[in-house]
Amino acid sequence: MYRTLPRSLFFTLFLLFSLPLIAHSASGFPSLPISDMYAYDQALPLNPKMEVAKESDLYILYAVEYDSVWGRRVTGMYMVPKQGKRPFPALIFGHGYSGSKKDISDGIEPAAKAGFCLMSIDAWYHGDRKVEGKELYSRELFHMRDGLINTAVDMRRAVDFLQSRSGEVDPDKISYFGGSMGGIIGALFTGMDTRVKAPVLIVGGADWSYLISHSIVAQVGLRLTPAEGASMAKDAKVVLAPADPLNTAQLIAPRPLLMLNAKHDILVNPVSNVKLFRQALPPKKIIWFDSGHGVPINDALKICLDWFNEYVKNSSTPTFTSSIEGYNTAPYEPTGKVYVQSPISDIPIDEYFGYDKSSPLLSSRQPVDSVNLDYDTFSITFQSTHDRMVNATLNIPSTGSAPFPCVIFAHDINGSPNDSSLLTSVLARNGIATVSFAMYGYKTGESNDLNGLRIGPYGTRNILVQTVQDMQRLMDMLNNLEDIVAQSYIVVGSGLGADASIVASGLDDRIRAIVAMNALEYKDLLENGKPSENDADSVYKQMRFSEKIMSPLYPVMPELFLKRIWPRPLLFVDTKPEKDKKSSYARKLFMSYDNPSELYSLSAKTDDMATNIGDLQRRLIVFIKAAMKSKQQQRKIETTENRKTKGNDKNSAKDTKQTKIIKITMKDGLITATVGPFDRKILPNSIVSEISYKDGRQRTLQLNQKEIKADEGEIILYQGFIPEMTGISAIKAGGLDLNGEPIIEKSIKIEE
């Protein structure tokens, strides 16, 4: 499944990893460099918080916090010496499993006396970052992989923090030491960050597959039977490859590496130590203690500080290449052959999106009061990846027999789950359930929530990855509901939600058909500094479009996943106004996808005779119903809908008798649409308002029937409250009549 590189070629090819790879793995997916999984937006603000925790004659100790990836706050300690010449060299410490940042407390005073700043952070699920029911070492291997990698990225952010301490820390003299788990993660962190000089790894090892089958942690901590351990070890070779020091230790060179290990260690045993040491390249040194996992702390600390004085503070050049020594004992000698594989350079992209399907959903379902008679509404929650609890709204048809087929709706960035109003009622009347979920980062100001697209290209990628995994976890939950048809879903995505829907469909065969509405081309997003004019502080505004910016988004490019969707039907919808429809992103995707597919374009022009909303509703219903019945066309179709007519058109007289929106008003956030006159009844709850904002966003709002004025020609009033009032430029309303025909819509401009 994975490609391996000869050691002599590794460094040459590693230089190419900043560019997207086009090689394909055995799984058929393109490959992703392992190094890319440790990348992040360095322009992401730290938003540091510092409070004095302790002060002595030798140092000031601060409690610190700062922002890192996945919307997390990292907690740590930071010590600054009071004596000595500034700026000081600095050390980062990584604690062991079940430990915390406080494990370095005994090393604070010696480090201060030696003239080093010292920083220690809590790893994921440790110290002040504990999450109930979660452990970093876990039977859930994807969860474990992400925790290890993200802790290494948090350490990279610690380097950012130290380098921001101008005049206090020498930005070119930062190093690392860590023990046990901290030694393992340290090999990941220092392999991926060349800013870290001369690291020290204490009782660390490599080869997760070996450790799981030979370490007491796996046997006792994870409570694995021998058979379970053997199975998990086999899976770990694949899943944990990106978080295995076997694949990062060689990247530490040419910086000198020191390893301190124990001859009688039963936790991270000597064979795994030897694997790590052999995988590293010169200059490297290993010192063996005649002890168990708990090496003599004072002796180890003295060795570390002497090493840091020599190779960090004084920047000396090592006189050794590969040194094996014993501390008051003979060095460890393996009794048998120790096999070390060539480093793995990349993984298939589908492995990058992998998650633990057996992870508990912790789901709930509660009924919600609704004025709509077409469906019953439920508020549902479930646990997704990265400890995220996802909120979603499930709508079950009020009539008909369960189980119902289900459509999943993914909204656009800065949108809302309520944007599914375009389809909810009409689908319910056709016996189809709908569910819409809140995209990661779609709101601002919430704990552990990303702020739109301001965080940069890697943060944007994380939004998409999380959304794809949320969609898959949602399907896991829906499979357990008796009133939903399992293992067969249609997804409808809008904007960034359309991109995520295409990616999810390429990864998950449970999706049987896809509707991609106004899919977002990342190139345009980055060139224009979107998504909104309000994002004045966006890091995109500070960058010009380049390969450097696009490369982070490569793993989530919809084009990469289209071939994996075939032959499932895909409807591309293009409703946004463009001067040249032939160059639209929807058309590009349509042209690159094999049969069966359809490109459906609506006219960009609207007036009192336009029926775009109703036309779109009707086309989506036809596509979805056909897909549910597996009666989709087996060819490519391109349709352009334009129902605009001139006043002198011969059909004008007929059109004026059609059902139409007569008037739209807005007051105090309440939209009121007047509908009529008509010969046929309006389809209840089929009137939808499209709200346009000055920053280019669009939202849909279902309008509910308020009253019928029979004495005025059966004019019906529909009303609905706008969820976001700021920056509205226009409001449009339209929909379908009882026969499923589009009614003539109307739009109004909103003046400030």
Image (cartoon, helix red, strand yellow):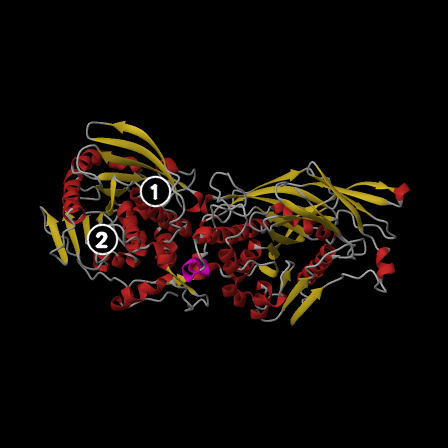
Percent of width and height locating residue 414: 56, 47
Badge 1 crowding class, 10 Å Cα cut-off, few under 14, some 14 to 19, many 20 or more, is many
Disc number for residue 273? 2
Percent of width and height locating residue 348: 42, 63
Taking 637 as reference, is 361 left or right?
A: left
Quadrant containing the C terminus is: top right
The residue range painted magenta reads 546-554
Q: Give the residue displayed 33% in from the left and 45% down from the top.
A: 160
Q: CA distance from mark 2 to mark 1?
A: 22 Å
| Residue linked to disc 1 | 123
The amino acid type found where label 2 is placed reads Asn
Look at the numbered disc 1 and give the secondary structure of its residue: loop
Q: Give the residue displayed 69% in from the left and 61% down from the top.
A: 603
Q: Which of the 4 quarters of the picture holds residue 633?
A: bottom right
Compared with residue 508, is residue 683 higher up or lower down, i.e. above or below? Answer: above
466 or 709: nearer the viewer: 709
- Indicate whether residue 19 is drawn in magenta: no
Badge 2 crowding class, 10 Å Cα cut-off, few under 14, some 14 to 19, many 20 or more, is many
Report whether residue 356 is seen: no
Q: Which of the 4 quarters of the picture holds residue 275?
A: bottom left
